[in-house]
Image (cartoon, rainbow, N blue to C red):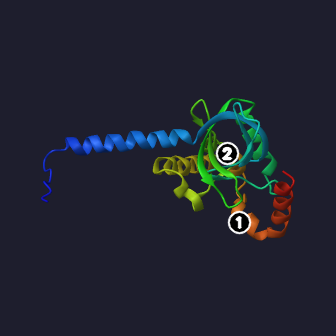
Amino acid sequence: MKVKLIRNNKKPILVFIFIISTSLSGIALSSTLDGKIIKIIDGDTVYFQANNDDAYKKLRLVGIDAPEMKQPFGYQSKQCLANLINNKHVQIISFGEDRYKRTLAKILIKKIDINLAMVKNGCAWFYRRYKNTLDKDDQVMYDQAEIFSIENKKGLFSNQEAEAPWDWRKKNWTIFLNTYQYKYRSS
């Protein structure tokens, strides 16, 4: 059986790309949920309840890392997230789960990326260690938002000695572990 190669005819390829892209957009939409944030744990962890659902999900905001509650600026970071959300209707985009079974998610309010707003307001760091969870455009925006916050001394970046949460956790592992176990065992 001979296979005829199609040369110089881009139409079948474009049709194929169109079919694949429209199918993938349907998959992306299936991981989007509307609802409300019912509890804020800290600057990067919340509980979400979807519309018409009694159950709730624990969300870890993807692409950012906020100060721990026992860390300097921890409370302010949590308050910053509360001010951004402020009992508004939210949409979440799910990116799977982390090792603690929290849903990795981006929170949107009227198409505004709240995770990005946390970085832009100086309430969280861009979590470069897990940057590949985000698409390339988001990686650039989160990086630029952090640079903007540092240059303009926004939020936690007004303190030159602000310590990234991943460094703080290493130094304070016992405190972090005890807090974390209590927080997630009791919830």
Q: Nearer the viewer, residue 143 or 20?
A: 20
**Which amino acid, by three-letter code, is at mark 2?**
Lys
In x, y percent, where is residue 88? 71, 29
Q: Nearer the viewer, residue 8 or 120?
A: 8
Q: Where is mark 1, residue-wise?
A: 167
Which residue is at 60% across, 29% downward?
110
**Which amino acid, by three-letter code, is at mark 1?**
Asp
Q: Can you say whether 54 is above or below 43 in the image? A: above
The residue tagged with tag 1: helix, strand or loop?
Answer: helix
Please tell me how many numbered marks the rendered image carries: 2
Which residue is at 78% across, 43% downward?
40
Assess disc 2: are there few (<14), some (14-19) or many (≥20) residues with their C-alpha within 10 Å of its C-alpha.
some
The residue tagged with tag 2: helix, strand or loop?
Answer: loop
Q: Where is mark 2, residue-wise?
A: 154
Estimate the spatial distance between the alpha carbons at disc 1 and disc 2, rounded to whole Å. Answer: 20 Å
Quarter of the image where one finds residue 116? top right
Assess disc 1: are there few (<14), some (14-19) or many (≥20) residues with their C-alpha within 10 Å of its C-alpha.
few
Question: Tags 1 and 2 in contact by the CB under 8 Å rule?
Answer: no
Q: Which mark is residue 5?
A: none
Task: Mark yes or no: residue 11 visible.
Answer: yes
Mark before the other along the chain sequence, 1 or 2 = 2
Task: Mark yes or no: residue 63 visible.
Answer: no
In x, y percent, where is residue 183? 84, 55
Q: Quadrant of the N terminus?
A: bottom left
Whether residue 41 sits left or right of residue 143 in the image: it is right
Q: Nearer the viewer, residue 127 or 41?
A: 41
In x, y percent, where is residue 64? 64, 52
Q: Nearer the viewer, mark 1 or mark 2?
A: 1
Whether residue 105 sits left or right of residue 168 in the image: it is left
Residue at the extreme front of the image, as rendered? 1
In x, y percent, where is residue 122? 67, 46
